[in-house]
Amino acid sequence: MDMKKDLVAASATPLVLAILAEGDSYGYAIIKRVTELSGGHLQWTDGMLYPVLHRLERQGHVAAKWSASENGRRRKYYRITREGRAQLAAQRRQWQVVDGTLRGIWMRTRTA
Amino acid sequence: MTTFADRPLEDQIAQWRAYLRRRQALHGSDVEELEGHLRDQLTALTEAGLAGDEAFLVAVKRMGSLDALSREFARAHSERLWKQLVMAPAAPDEPAGTGRAELLVVLGLAVAAAVAIKVPALFGLRLGGGDEPFYARNASLFVFPLLAAYFVWKRGSDAAHGLRLALPFAAGAVFANVFPFGAGSNTGILTALHLPIALWLAVGLAYVRGRWLADGGRMNFVRFSGELAIYYALIALGGGVLTGMTMMMFKSIGMNAEWLAQGWLLPCGAMGAVLIGSWLVEAKQSVIENMAPVLTRLFTPLFTILLLVFLGTMAWTGNPIHVEREVLIGFDLLLVLVVGLVLYAASARDPEAPPDFFDGLQLVLVVSALVVDGVALGAIAARISEFGFTPNRVAALGENLILLVNLAWSAWLYARFLRRRAPFAALEQWQIAYLPVYAVWAALVVVVFPPLFGYR
């Protein structure tokens, strides 16, 4: 499915925060998780995840730490912060409003 | 998976990494993070059965366009497009802690320079009293040896080289102080003006680790000198503001801080700033664009216009040059300026590039400076034959001659270069080969002139 860029960009923040809320993770694993959760429908350009992560880090929503990975290289792990969880909750409410509204109108059009 | 057994794949990754590193918005740690991602992706793809180069193509494609990526990085880190000098992280190939050690050394030397200028006061030589000629003659000796010491430390030169470097400074200290200069002695003032020029060559020797003729060292020292002058001017501006604030604030509570400003802030700051400025130039050389060539580009056309208009006006009105006391010095300064413009234009130029408009402009500048100076020299020669030689006139004439020879030959080389008869490197070679001439002449003025003219 070809998604609109704006929609992908808008959903990136809550998705990344939600995945990090499941547990600490790193770039490649986050991308894999997104693909898995969306059943392959949500395809990100891999590189673009990192500016998003860095922006969240700068805003204090996530914290990052370099540590060794299982392959011996250094890897940057991200962890959601308290502010990040609050942000996630706020975004969740907003998306639920959007989702609920769309659901409502689409139900009606289908039944109509 | 740390590295791939597949040699070509490793090469491709290295190439990709080098390409990423050139992006200004991407820092070393970002590149490392992205490379880690690429390697994870490659592992997954090769495990899924793709050959090395196929996997590489897919992984790079998934990473997305690098232009878009660095644009996003730039948006997330807008400060990165403004190069930060003092906060810049150390180069990755430098061992950690070098920057901190260097900062400590520089601060130590700067404090030493600031203390050094106050040491003579312990022996009753008062700055701002009648001992100003002493301070003027010795000004460079308070700080240049420390600057040379910084370069000896920074370049890791051996002790023998350091000791050899101490010789010119010791000689300078002797010649600045053994001669019986009277009050208001002209040769004393000439020493004060020329000793720094002579000793700057010794600083240059420390800068190039004593290998004056080795590849590119001299030109780097020229670049360093220009950048230092600019940084020094900037620091001096800030120092002026600091001094003004000090005076104003203490005045508001009814205290006069003039002794603090003139006795401490100004002299100590002027000495320490040489070392701090040098350190900044050393730290920034690869970080920020050099300013001296930029100013050269800006002012070469303006000075060319000035000289041409001046010549035109002189020819039109027929007004001769009035030979006042300062005229000879004034035209010396003009030649110094033009030599500086030629030198710094050469320092930033790609020697391989073909002649362009700017080179033509340089030639016009040099030739018109030569003509203006020729006219002035004619007027001055008449005055000297009338009033005889004084130390000031001989020194100024000698300098004029030295600069004239330099510019005349530069004009010849520029003309040959513009007609593609000679490479640009010939001009660059000439300029840097000429550098010691200035220092040798300055040393002559310091050593020979006082006894020659009876210390007057």
Image: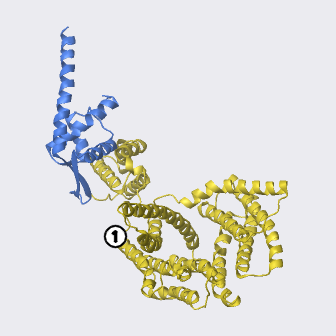
Chain colours: A blue, B yellow
Q: Is residue B374 visible?
A: yes
Which chain is home to disc 1? Answer: B
Can you say whether B393 is above or below B375 in the image?
Answer: below
The kind of residue on which mark 1 rests is Arg
Nearer to the camera, A29 or B54: A29
The spot of residue B263 in percent (x, y) is 44, 74
Q: Quadrant of the C terminus of chain B?
A: bottom right
Q: Is residue B354 visible?
A: no
Mark 1 = which residue? B100
Quadrant for residue B342, please give it: bottom right
The spot of residue B448 in percent (x, y) is 67, 88
The answer to whether residue B332 is left or right of residue A9 is right
**What element does badge 1 sit on?**
helix
Can you say whether B292 is above or below B222 in the image?
Answer: above
The spot of residue B145 in percent (x, y) is 48, 81
Q: Quadrant of the N terminus of chain B?
A: bottom left
Q: Residue furthest top?
A: A112
